[in-house]
Amino acid sequence: MINKITNFASSKTQLKRIIWTLPLTVTMLVGWSSIAWAKDPFRENNSRDIGKYTEEAFKTIFLKGDYKAVEQKLRLAESKEPNEPLAHAMLASLAYTEKDWSNIKKYALQTLESAQLLSETDPVRGNLYLAVGHFLDGAYVYEKEGALDAIDKLQLVFRYLDRAEDADPNDPELNLIKGYMDLLLAVNLPFSSPDQAIARFEDRAAPNYLVERGLAVAYRDLKQYDEALKYVNKALETAPKNPEHYYLKGQILRKLGKEENSIELLLEAVENFKTALDKSAQLPDFVLKTLARENRLTQEEIAEIRLGKR
């Protein structure tokens, strides 16, 4: 995998996509629970206590899709559960959505420090979040120093992921985070086959609705839109209040509608975009900008079909 990353560095556009997408992916990689206590959202067996405040922040952002309400909850997690690397990783990722580079650096380093401490007692989670911390720091390095300097960080990411996998290759939290990375690379690297990454992600990762969301994105990018719709609908069944799921469904319907020149599918895409826009107060500005643009372009495409221009 490291060789693939190194060889892939010559494609700046694709490397930028990976560098800029994965910090946000980190914020999507944690689960939720129907209760407020500190229950492990990933494991039914050999569970860990991640902290009830950290979990409450998880629920706010992943169940409700509310980026704006989560900051206060994360500050509480940072104060009450300072040794939980996932809380620091989420704070770094939240800073990323605001392009707050000083805090990205700050919380990436805190992720690394808490992960290093955790690795002494929990080599799976400790090494996993050492990988996450280096990736978040890599996003900072990419912005400030450029793509070539970020390559070293990517190599560290996969080194620590390998160590976590050596400790327990079937761990669902590991397979969720690593699975998102593997899917992104498999979809975008030249001459790669995503089948193995998809199968492993589906079989070993948890919780289910984040797996389903990841598969919907992968199949969207592979232009297998029927499969993408199947998985995004499953994610919506579990987390119907998350506006990002409606946005994702709208994207898939738009692509399918353009492919089939179908007004019906494009209208359904607009309905999903509008459902997401109705909860715009929950979403970060950069998501709203692309959401509004895709909604406008879809309506223009509908008008073109009606006028016989397509």
Image (cartoon, rainbow, N blue to C red):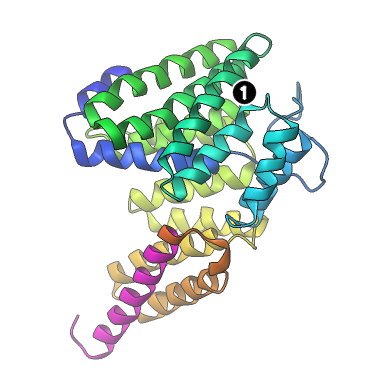
Question: Type of residue at label 1?
Answer: Asp
Give the secondary structure at mark 1: loop
Nearer-the-camera pick, 180 or 289: 289
Residue 218 place in picture, x, y as percent? 41, 46
Residue 60 place in picture, x, y as percent? 67, 52
Q: Residue furthest front?
A: 102
**In the rendered image, which quarter is residue 136 located in?**
top left
| Residue 138 located left or right of residue 10 | right
Q: Residue at x 38, y 65 (%)?
A: 289
Residue 62 place in picture, x, y as percent? 62, 50
The range drawn in magenta is 287-310
Dominant SS in magenta: helix
Residue bearing the label numbered 1: 171
Q: Residue at x 31, y 74 (%)?
A: 297
Q: Quadrant of the N terminus?
A: top left
Q: Residue furthest bottom?
A: 307
Q: Residue at x 44, y 61 (%)?
A: 285
Nearer-the-camera pick, 128 or 44: 128
Judge whether 159 appears above or below 19 on screen: above
Count up the numbered dots. 1
Regarding residue 84, the answer to whether it shows in the image is yes
Q: Quadrant of the C terminus?
A: bottom left
Residue 171 place in picture, x, y as percent? 62, 23
Regarding residue 5, the answer to whether it shows in the image is no
Is 69 covered by the magenta stretch? no
Judge whether 203 appears above or below 212 on screen: above
**In the rendered image, which quarter is residue 58 located in?**
top right
Crowd band around label 1 with a 10 angstrom C-alpha radius: few (<14), some (14–19), many (20+): some
**In the rendered image, which quarter is residue 120 located in?**
top right
Judge whether 193 appears above or below 155 on screen: below
| Residue 162 located left or right of residue 295 | right
